[in-house]
Image (tube, helix red, strand yellow):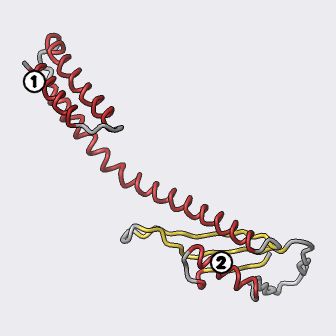
Amino acid sequence: MRICTTVFFITAVEMILPKNSIKKYGKFALGLILVTVIIDPFIKVFDNNFNLERYVAQASSYMTSSENKDFSDYKKESIEKSSRVFAENLSKIGQGELERIMPECSFQVDVEVEYNEESTEFIIQRTKVLVSSSGIKQIKKITIGNSQEVSNNNEVSGEVQVKVKDTLSQLLNISPDKIKIYKE
């Protein structure tokens, strides 16, 4: 009687399932249910104390408790990975666009991204751009034996700064104040 009822139920559910990729997963789950119903009487012959509902309840409670513990760790790890990949992709896109606009220079773009829990968005905190011009580079002055610190202002100004800030602020949709440009 149980097997007939289960087959009837499975047939009804298969008729309701949509005709797409979900149908094969539904058939698989329904097949597992049917196999369980068929095997249940044979297991009871060998073990009179066997109760399928009890085992299902234990498995369900174990899965629920372990999911709650692991979910927060999984979510945190997933957000960190997504943030890192997002920042790397934005860096590559920005670098490619800058080198396309100004082929006489080479650029290294570093984008820092943070995840906002409330709005569930990744927000660009700041962008650092290292600009190096092609050709011969100027030698930096080296002082030996002098304990005085030499201030080295590496920030870029002028036309390059304006082009880089305009390009990146439009491309990344951020304020130009969040973009810092340095020369090598």
Look at the picture and state if 1 lies above or below 64.
above
Outermost bottom residue: 158
For mark 2, what is the residue? 167
Q: In this view, does 86 lie above or below 151?
A: above
Q: Which amino acid does label 2 sit on?
A: Thr
> Looking at the picture, does residue 53 appear above or below residue 105?
above
Where on the picture, by quarter, is residue 84?
Answer: bottom right
Q: Residue 68: give x, y in percent of width and height.
A: 30, 50
Q: Tag 2's secondary structure?
A: helix
Task: Give the camera-side residue of 143 and 15.
Answer: 15
Q: Which residue is drawn at 76% across and 89% down?
A: 158
Task: Check the image and name the residue furthest to the left.
Answer: 1
Q: Splitting the image into 4 quarters, where does residue 59 fall? A: top left
Circle 2 Cα neighbour tier, 10 Å, few/some/many (<14 / 14–19 / ≥20): some
Q: Which of marks 2 and 1 is nearer the N terminus?
A: 1
Left or right of 42, for residue 92: right
Residue 5 is tagged as 1
Q: Which residue is drawn at 71% across and 82% down?
A: 163
Q: Residue 106 vs residue 88: left or right? A: right
